[in-house]
Amino acid sequence: MNAEIVSLKNVSVYFNDVSVLEDITFSIKQNDFLAIIGPNGGGKTTLLKVILGLIKPNRGEVAVFGKTPEEGRKLIGYLPQYTSFDLKFPINVFNVVLMGRYNGIFKRYSKEDKEAVINALKIVEMLEFRDRQIGKLSGGQLQRVLLARALARERKLLVLDEPMTNIDPEMQQSFYELLVELKKEMTIVLVTHDIGVVSVYVDEIACLNRKLVYHGSKETALKKLEDLYKCPVELIAHGIPHRVLKRH
C-alpha cells in the first residue's frame, strides 16, 4: 500500500470571516495522480497554498511528508496558475530552468545543478530548445519549460494549478500524457476545469466547493458533479470525452 504523503484533518480557512475552506479532511498517497475540480471561488488554489505552507489554516492539522507544510514543501515542485514575466527579457530556456535550483544570492550554481537542468529538460522533451530565448516559445513549449523548472530539484510531489490555460488542445493532450509518465516517479496534484479530459488520465478526483464534496475514484466522482456544480451535468463525446453543463 502506498505511503501517505499529505494529510489534512478538519482544515478550515477564513478570509475576513468569510469561509473559503470548511472542515476539509483527506489524504494524498505516494504516486497518486489526483485532480482537484470545482467552480471558481470554490477554494482550489487556497487548498494548494495550505499544502504548500503559504496559507496557515484557521483550524485543523496539515502534514506534508510527515512534517509541517513549511518543512515539507522542500520536496514539492509547484507550477502556479499565473506565471507572468517579461517574455522580451533576454534569458534562454536553460537559465529559466536553472532558476529552479536557486539557493541564495551568494551561492553559485554547481555542476550538479546544471546536470539537473539538463535532465529536467530531457524529461519534458525541451532539451533541443535549451539556448532559445523564452519569448520565442509557443504557449505549450513555455509551459513545459516552467514544468522543467519545477522538476529541477527532483521533487517527490508535483503541484500544478490550472496549467493548461492558454494552451491549444493538441499541446494539452501531450502535456497530460507527460504527466502520466511523471506519475511513475512522483505524486501529482492537478487543479483544473477540464473535467472530462482529465478523467481520462487521472487516478482520483477531489470535488471541492468550500467543502469536500467527494474524494475518490474518477468513475464515482463523475456522478457527483451535479452536487458540486448545483446544476444538471451531461456527458457528451467530442474527440476526447468531456462533460458540459446543460443550460441552467
Image (cartoon, grey):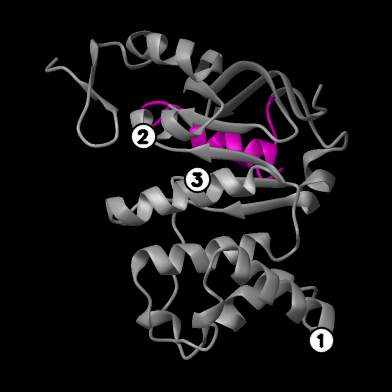
Residue count near mark 3 (Cα–Cα under 10 Å), binned few <14, some 14–19, many ≥20: many
Tell me the residue that label 1 is attached to.
108
Magenta residue check for 50: yes
* Three-letter code, disc 3: Asp
For the magenta stretch, what is the residue range? 38-58
Is residue 201 left or right of 123 when viewed as pictured? left
* Three-letter code, disc 2: Val
Is residue 137 left or right of 181 when viewed as pictured? left
| x and y, in percent, of residue 224 in the image | 41, 10
Q: Residue at x 84, y 47 (%)?
A: 71
Residue 80 to residue 237: above or below: below
Tell me the residue that label 2 is attached to.
197
Q: Earlier in the sequence, mark 3 or mark 1?
A: 1
The dot on residue 161 is 3
Q: Earlier in the sequence, mark 2 or mark 1?
A: 1
Q: Nearer the viewer, residue 57 or 167?
A: 167
For the residues marked 3 and 1, what is the alpha-carbon distance in whole angstroms? Answer: 30 Å
Residue 99 to residue 174: above or below: below
The dot on residue 35 is none
Q: Nearer the viewer, residue 43 or 91?
A: 91
| x and y, in percent, of residue 85 in the image | 45, 73
* Three-letter code, disc 1: Arg
SS of the residue under disc 2: helix
> How many numbered badges does the structure rendering display?
3
Q: Residue at x 38, y 76 (%)?
A: 137
SS of the residue under disc 1: loop
Residue 160 to residue 109: above or below: above
Q: Nearer the viewer, residue 241 or 33?
A: 241
Q: Earlier in the sequence, mark 3 or mark 2?
A: 3
Quarter location, residue 192? top left
Is residue 246 left or right of 159 when viewed as pictured? left
SS of the residue under disc 3: strand
